[in-house]
Amino acid sequence: MTGTSPDFRPILELKNLTKIFGGLTAIHDLSLTFYSQKLQSIIGPNGAGKTTLFNLITGMFSPDSGHIFLKGEDITHLSAPEIFRRRIVRTFQISSIFPQLTVLKNAEIAAQGRHRTSNSPWGRSKLTRKQIQDICIEHLKKLKLSDQREQKAGLLAYGDKRRLEIVMALVSDPEVLLLDEPTAGMSPEETRESAQLIRELSRNVTVLLVEHDMKVVMGISDRVTVLNRGSILVDGDPRDIQKNSEVQSVYLGNPARS
């Protein structure tokens, strides 16, 4: 992956990252490169370090050692709002919608956060309300939620709630999008639809995906990284990952979900 094609440009680089909590090393000397407009999945058993890695990338934690570079800029010790303003955006395992507000209002609140003149929640918006609304409606259409935009978000079906969270991330205009278990709890049909939508997103956005459904991971990923005890066990093409005996032993052959 060292060619000059735009598809192979490094966008996010992790170099020798280590994070320790008390006596537990959650991430150990981890180096990894993510490429522009590619979909890379991160898998691994319980305690592998997947969530900690996302927390480091998004500024929720600072590493004890090592560096994080976004397009060559060292962002290692920037705050979460500063990293967000550099267009690294994340969804969470636990639903983060406002259930009493409409679908459209949820999206508008997320968009307003991206387009303020400062990190302050009281910063003025750089866009008019109409411009923000148009952006939100456009993304709701893409995620097939436009017809439900005036419905209270709490009344959505589970799969639609997860899609709304992706909309709320997309209206923040991400360059790097981190999706944390986006299909968890979905029906098989919802999972299929969401997997296809995520695959389509990666045509324009670099997607980092933590996901436990191996059919989804192997079906839509350009690359798969397997973590085990805070270190990279193996990293490569999905087909090679599936055949790897170590991966089968540590993760794929284990029915437990982390």
Image (spheres, rainbow, N blue to C red):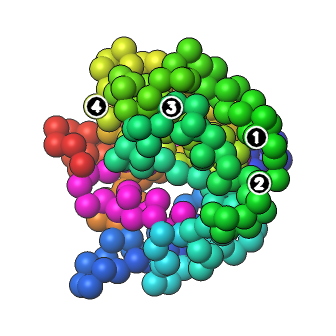
Which circle's residue, 4 or 2, is located before the other in the chain?
2
Span highlighted in magenta in the image = 35-58
Residues 123 and 205: in front is: 123
Q: CA distance from mark 1 to mark 2?
A: 9 Å
Magenta span contains residue 129: no
Is residue 240 rendered to the left or right of residue 38? left
Residue at 47% x, 37% y: name it.
101
Number of the front mark, 3 or 4: 3
Q: Where does residue 61 sit, x and y in percent of width and height?
A: 46, 73
Which of the two labelled residues, at mark 3 and mark 4, occupies the earlier sequence position? Answer: 3
Q: Amino acid at mark 2?
A: Ser
Q: Is the residue 48 above or below the residue 188 in the image? A: below
Question: Which residue: 67% across, 64% down?
Answer: 122
Q: Secondary structure at mark 2?
A: loop
Q: Position of residue 186 (x, y in %)?
A: 32, 26
* Local SS, label 1: helix
The residue beneath circle 1 is 129
Residue 17 appearing in the image: yes
- For the residues bearing labels 1 and 2, Cβ distance under 8 angstroms: yes
**What is the C-alpha distance between the residues marked 3 and 4?**
22 Å
Badge 2 is on which residue?
Answer: 125
Q: Earlier in the sequence, mark 3 or mark 1?
A: 3
**What's the distance in space between the residues labelled 3 and 1, CA to CA?**
16 Å
Q: Which residue is mark 3?
A: 102
